[in-house]
Image (cartoon, rainbow, N blue to C red):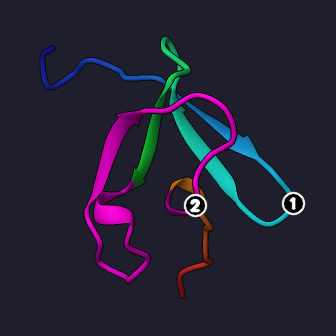
Amino acid sequence: MSGNSKYLWRINKYTKFCTIRDYGNQKLLVNASGAKYDNGTKVTIWPYTGSAPEHGKITFIKAD
């Protein structure tokens, strides 16, 4: 992939969180590395089917 290529993600919005999955392969889920929850935790893309685990639930917070 070149630096100018677009990559598509699917963001599913639920009441209290969102999940982010690869648009072309819905089995790939963005989640927190090491099942951590701390700010600054690295994220990974991991194959996961079914409901997202807690460390795969993303909350967007308005930045000031």
- Residue found 21% across the figure and 22% down from its top: 4
Relative horizontal placement of residue 53, taking residue 18 as reference (left or right): left
The dot on residue 7 is: none
The dot on residue 15 is: 1
Relative height, residue 35 to residue 39 (above, below): above
Q: Residues within 10 Å of mark 1 (few under 14, many from 20)?
A: few
- Residue found 52% across the figure and 54% down from its top: 56
Classify the position of the N terminus by image quarter. top left
Classify the position of the C terminus by image quarter. bottom right
For mark 1, give the secondary structure. Answer: loop
Q: Nearer the viewer, residue 51 or 24?
A: 51
Q: Quadrant of residue 51?
A: top right
Q: Quadrant of residue 60?
A: bottom right
Q: Amino acid at mark 2?
A: Ile
How many numbered discs sit on the rendered protein? Answer: 2
**Residue beneath label 2, please?**
58
Q: Amino acid at mark 1?
A: Thr
Numbered range of the magenta stretch: 32-55
**Residue 40 x %, y %:** 29, 77
| Residue that sits furthest to the left in the current view | 2
**Residue 19 x %, y %:** 62, 46
